[in-house]
Image: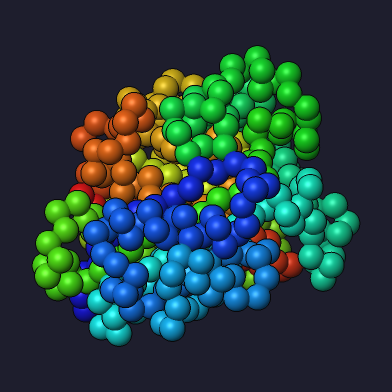
Amino acid sequence: MEDVYVLGIGMTPFGKHPDKSPADLGAQAVNLALSDAGVGRGDIGAAWVGHVFQGMAMGQRALYAAGISGIPIDNVENACSSGSTAIWDAALALRAGAYDIVLALGVEHMTTAFRGALAPDPSDIEAQLGLTMPGIYAMRAQRYMLQYGVEPQDIARIAVKNKRNAAMNPLSHFKKAVTLEEVMQGRLIADPLRMHECAPISDGAAAVVMVTKSKLKQLGGSRAIKLAASSLRSGRTEVGLVDMTVEDLTWRTAEAAYEQAGVGPGEIDFAEVHDCFSIAEALRVEGMGLVPHGEYVARVGKGEMDLNGILPVNGSGGLLGKGHPLGATGVAQVVELVKQLRGDAGERQIENAKIGVAHCRGGKAQGVEGTACTVNILVA
């Protein structure tokens, strides 16, 4: 099977874009990725487009706006993992030899679909009775605090770190760093989580051009970054009581990625993880085996996850700072990994970044741990 590389990347600013349609945002990201890859529209053999709430044929609308039509276009919906699942699909097609150059796009215009928190699906009885995403993660934070002797302000430092990183990212939703005092004085959303600890409603798009190793040799792209692993798993049926501080789904997905890439968690230099809420970052980093269970929050307090720390996490600002346009999030994480591995991250640049991991977990379905989880590992 062919090795796969990310040849080009493109991303719009994340935030609120009332003057642009989802197709406008998607086309902007696609054109940036094509330009970065040094290829034309006619070179793309197929495309996978991740989105959640954008309606029928979003991929065709976005690619048409970018001047691309007539090729196989697959619309991918997998909750928050939609964009990263598009990358997984594209990588499979390349490795299978079906194509040698393809496109993965993630796009979402959340502000036209929601004015506040995401509404639960009517079929989800648990969510209709109050077990919404903020409620779930508040419960998980409460259990983490009880189990590991952590205080709310300790978890809040994750938001401080990520928004500090986001302030250095020109494409992030939030451009202002916040202090711990500001986080703790913020509006309480679901105890103990406050406003700055919850990902915002964002619009945006991100795209990557992906190629096989043989095609890369033809094109001669010296800035390509190897996609060493791309794994996807879904949640298992939950039976009986579960430990809310442990993510089996995240571990199973990461374990498959480590095996595919031929690396272990101790070899990861930096990570982009799905911090939809502050506590989620702790659960995901621990879930991937990058830090022992119960230690992450304390290590954030020591600065170990800062840009100059032992294991930088969410140097882009993460979902809390960069924003969270659902379908675009997983692709944007890979865009950040490519920037870091190329040495193009500017003042956010992580020293000696050679191996990066992107974790994206999305959604909730009644009776299972989680809807979908993806882990992508990129190597310079």
Q: In this image, 38 relative to 199: left or right? A: left
Quarter occupied by the N terminus:
bottom left
User: Height in image: 373 above or below 58?
Assistant: above
Dividing the picture into quadrants, the one containing residue 98 is bottom left
Classify 274 as above or below 303.
below
- Residue depicted at 38% across the width and 72% down the height: 90
Q: How many marks?
A: 0
The front one of 327 and 281 is 327
Residue 182, horizontal then vertical, whole percent: 66, 18
Q: Position of residue 346 (x, y in %)?
A: 32, 31
Q: Is residue 87 above or below residue 357?
A: below
Q: Is residue 96 above or below residue 349?
A: below
> Who is closer to the viewer here, 260 or 30?
30
Residue found 78% across the figure and 30% down from its top: 188
Scheme of image coloration: rainbow
Does residue 339 show up? Answer: yes
The answer to which of 8 and 369 lies nearer the viewer is 8
Is residue 88 visible to the viewer in this orientation of the structure? no
Q: Residue furthest right?
A: 129
Q: Residue at x 41, y 82 (%)?
A: 71
Residue 202 point in image, percent of width and height = 63, 46
Quadrant of the rendered structure where residue 152 is?
top right
Q: Left or right: 67 with respect to 107? A: left
Q: Position of residue 15 (x, y in %)?
A: 60, 41
Q: Residue at x 74, y 57 (%)?
A: 113
